[in-house]
Amino acid sequence: KQEVTQIPAALSVPEGENLVLNCSFTDSAIYNLQWFRQDPGKGLTSLLLIQSSQREQTSGRLNASLDKSSGRSTLYIAASQPGDSATYLCAVPNTGGFKTIFGAGTRLFVKA
Amino acid sequence: EPEVTQTPSHQVTQMGQEVILRCVPISNHLYFYWYRQILGQKVEFLVSFYNNEISEKSEIFDDQFSVERPDGSNFTLKIRSTKLEDSAMYFCASSLIAGGQTGELFFGEGSRLTVL
């Protein structure tokens, strides 16, 4: 049964700092991994999708890496800004592909 | 940019009442999903829907729940007799192809259900 774990659970950093959020999954036979952002009381915004054949994916100040064999992904945020404050979720689909399993998220607070 | 829209944004209901949550997925998407998030907990899968039938459902999705695509644009979640523990944020999502086959999930803003 696939399980997704994210550490740390919460993170507080000063503005401008580069940071790394971690995600691990127990079953390495994944098709892809998706990172989301969730603001309080809001929906999930897709940030990056990494296919199983890819090692990394970049969008602006965000870079996500994937190491399937070790069951890990990282989300790197460069030059953090107060507007980056949110909860970041990683998620992987199950083997059949119709169900996506989410981690509990990392709550990020960037101080101005 | 195409988006998934959900209504209502917030619904308060009495225990035992029926509730229908509505979603308009992205127009060219083929797979539709409902997820829920109880306050402070993980986002959890409820059901996926493709080609007018359920493709997968979780243990949560019991006989009290049903989904329907009544026309070419709407996708609904019905809870027949709400319980206190149904209080949660319900998210609709859609994808062009199934998530496991390299499909990217797009979520709506959610419908907050409060059962009193």
Image (spheres, rainbow, N blue to C red):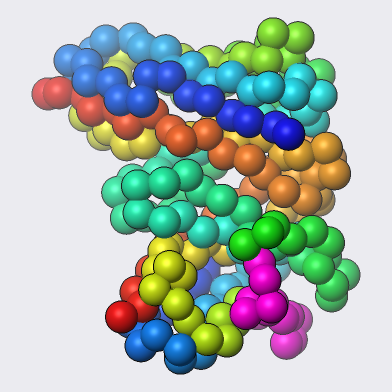
Q: Residue at x 33, y 9 (%)?
A: A18
Asked whether residue B103 is in view, the answer is no
**x, y (%) of residue A108?**
30, 28
B18 or A59, nearer to the observer? B18
Residue B52 painted magenta: no
Report whether B100 appears left or right of B8: right
Asked whether residue A86 is in view, the answer is yes
Quarter holding the N terminus of chain A is top right
Q: Magenta stretch?
A: B61-76
How many badges with numbers are in the image? 0
Q: Residue at x 46, y 70 (%)?
A: B86
**Residue lying at the far left of the rendered structure:** A112
| Rendered image quadrant of residue B94 | bottom right
Quarter holding the C terminus of chain A is top left
Q: Is residue B105 above or below residue B25?
A: above
Q: Residue at x 27, y 10 (%)?
A: A17
